[in-house]
Amino acid sequence: MAARWELVVAELVAERGDALVRYAMLLSGDEEEARDMVQDALAATFGRLRNGFEVEQAEAYVRRAIANRFLDRARRGQRWRRIAPLVGERERLDSGSTLTGERLDMAARLQRLTPRERACIVLRYDEDRTVEQIATELGISAGAVKRYLSDALRKLRGILEREQGRLQREERAPGGLA
Amino acid sequence: MSGEDELRRRLQELPGPAGRLDVDAVVERARKRRRPKVAAVTAAATGAGVLIVAPFVVPGLSPMSPSSTVMSEQGAGQEAAPEQEQAPAAGQDSGGDAGAAGAAQAAEACAIEDAEAAIGVDIAFEDDPGDGTADVAFTFLEDASFQVDGIGVALVERGTGRIIEAPDPADTAVDRLLGSGRHGSIEGEGGGTDGTVMLGVPLVLAAPVGCSGGSDHAAPAPLVWLTDASGAQRVVVGDPYRIG
């Protein structure tokens, strides 16, 4: 018979697995990397947790482990810095419909933020967390979270303005898009 | 970006993953991380059991010589039988000793703790260890302090953490480094943001011992011999190296 913690793993993966991988995908920008990160985080969390945890509590631990892994990998990550621009570029080239292109462009824009900025943006605007909750999850002060959010929003606005400016120049140019 | 609502909308429109998580692999890896504690308790209990039982079954171990007491209680007629049975048993023992020694050697070589579960430190190669040297990153998920005696390579299956091959602890290269502290001491605060990278570490080259069957997903992982804050010597394995 499966141990209690194994049932919690199965339930957590069945109910929240996709959400956890999506969270990790927004952070890392790559689905395979995200899945590895979530599997690592689950194994590490349940390798340590004793029995008596419910799915909600376990998910909080796993999410924190995902964030830690992401920030850690990003800090160490020569490899990550090498492939991130390539992933973003390839996705942009592959984008088909307008909606798909917009979604992929958004993912690419996220990758241009620093890891902590990205984590704060994803937690605040995708996961709808409060500043205090983000601070707890990432183990930093609320003031630092506000600063990261402010910097990230400023960068995203700048990126968008540059993209729009480039698009307008292309439209005005002879033989342009218009 | 016209505003925060627009950003929220765009983020939440991003599609989710296409694939699914492998629950069985997660459970298997988590079991493996929990196992060392169970194994330690089992080993301790077995050791205690042997100490308690030994005086009653091995004549030479007890100063009170319980064997003679038992035999005298059973009578002289029955004394010969255990002795006759003892000869083939001894033969079997000598044959079994070689096998047991080999198994014990493999068990010792393969009894390696996962670094993250054992000491709360994520250990990874930062570059390909194939040339005999590598940069090794230590990231502190929990507060830890230890002395690094040596770093070698184990072959580990990606995804499950199964150890396929490990350096032989009986190899003199391993024996020499135990307790040496040749790479100095490392300490850090937990939380996953504090870490140390050791650059250009010459890796310990020792004869390998097979631990389990091969795998298509095997990769080299850092194997670290360390002395922890209590002075205990331990061997831990980090994450398999990812190429590319």
Image: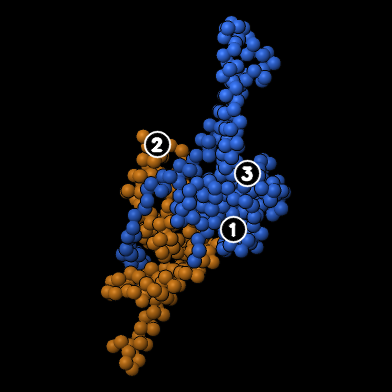
Residue lying farthest to the bottom in this orientation:
A174
Residue B213: x, y in percent?
A: 48, 48
Residue B232: x, y in percent?
A: 66, 41
On the same chain, marks 1 and 2? The answer is no
Q: Residue at x 32, y 60 (%)?
A: B18
Horizontal side of residue B174 vs A108, given as left or right: right
On the same chain, marks 2 and 3? The answer is no
Q: Three-letter amino acid code at disc 3?
A: Arg
Q: Residue at x 39, y 62 (%)?
A: A31
- In the rendered image, the quadrant that contains the N terminus of chain A is top left
Q: Three-letter amino acid code at disc 2?
A: Ala
- Distance CA(mark 2)–CA(mark 3): 29 Å
Q: Chain of mark 3?
A: B
Q: Which residue is the site of mark 1?
A: B137
Residue B234, labelled with which disc?
3
Q: Chain of mark 2?
A: A
Residue B135 seen anywhere in this rendered image of the structure: no
Q: Crowding at label 1, few (<14), some or many (≥20) Cα neighbours within 10 Å?
A: many
Residue A91: x, y in percent?
A: 37, 72
Chain letter for the part of the structure drawn in orange: A
Q: Which residue is the site of mark 2?
A: A3
Secondary structure, mark 1, is strand
Secondary structure, mark 2, is loop
